[in-house]
Amino acid sequence: MEYRLLEVLSFPKFNEEVAFKRLKSLRDVGLEVDERGATEVKLLGKGHSSVVFLSKHKEFGIVAVKVLRTDSKRDSLKQECKAMKQAQPIAPKIYSCGDEYVVMEFINGVNLEEYLKTLSACDELILLGLKILAVGKYLDDVGVDHHELSVLKDHVLIEASGRIRIVDFESSSLKPGRNLCRVFSGYFIRIPKVKLCCPSLSAEEGSTRELLKSYKGGNKEAYLELVKLILDKCLSSSCVCRG
């Protein structure tokens, strides 16, 4: 569904002053939009503190733009920008950032929930999970804690090439995180069709619990042991998972 840009810039309650201020800022950084805000834009998502829409940039072409909601409890998006820059190339590339907006790469990918519907073989499901697990470890290594990766369907996109990308760093912080542990729980424990491939894999099972505890304690070698454990417990059969 498309909306008039001026309305999106001051969502959810229209404020002419705020809308035109943001419009000017976005035009100044290269967005190709009408100076009256009459341009129709496609809304990509609405969160508790921001909205994201599709737009066009003079230099970068199609881009995604995030703006603060007028009723947001946050006063700036710059911390999120810092986290996304540090999380490159997993996060969307940042083109411009201000307190009230972020202009960034538009990732033309499929969300995890939809992508999983195309997979049925256990080897496909498990190998995808290991790729996402590796992304979680990468974020840990670069010091970005996403905080929301236990709910993967809202934050993981898969590009046509198979590349994994992570979006929505709204709750993130710049500190050593537990992304890998959250990904493990969110994918291998909470997704039913994956769980069918790994009936004996549990976060509470002794060896798994000890590996996750060791990883949280700073032992990065535990990651490789966890991967071996997943391969052993989940790819020991040639099951085909339905649903």
Image: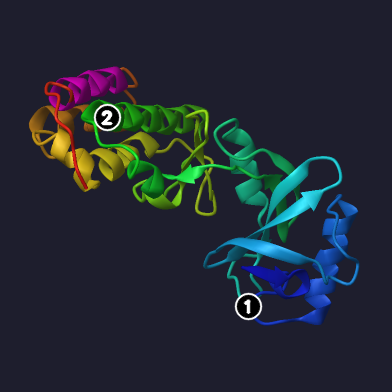
| Residue 135 placement: quadrant | top left
Q: Is residue 168 left or right of residue 114?
A: right
The magenta-colored residue range is 222-234
Residue for point 61% across, 49% down: 80
Residue 12: mark: 1
Q: Is residue 52 left or right of residue 34?
A: left
Q: Main secondary structure of the magenta part?
A: helix
Where does residue 190 sit, x and y in percent of width and height?
Answer: 23, 47
Q: Helix, strand, or loop for circle 2?
A: helix
Q: Quadrant of the N terminus?
A: bottom right
Residue 121 or residue 11, whichever sits in front:
121
- Identify the disc placed on residue 126: 2
Vertical placement of 193 versus 102: above or below?
above
User: 172 or 23: which is nearer to us?
Assistant: 23
- Residue 9 at what x, y percent from top left? 73, 69
x, y percent for residue 166: 50, 41
CA gap, disc 2 to disc 1? 41 Å
Horizontal placement of 54 versus 208: left or right?
Answer: right
Residue 196 visible within the image: yes
Q: Is residue 38 above or below residue 111?
A: below
- Residue 185 spot, x, y in % from top left: 26, 42
Question: Magenta segment: does it hold 189?
Answer: no
Q: Earlier in the sequence, mark 2 or mark 1?
A: 1
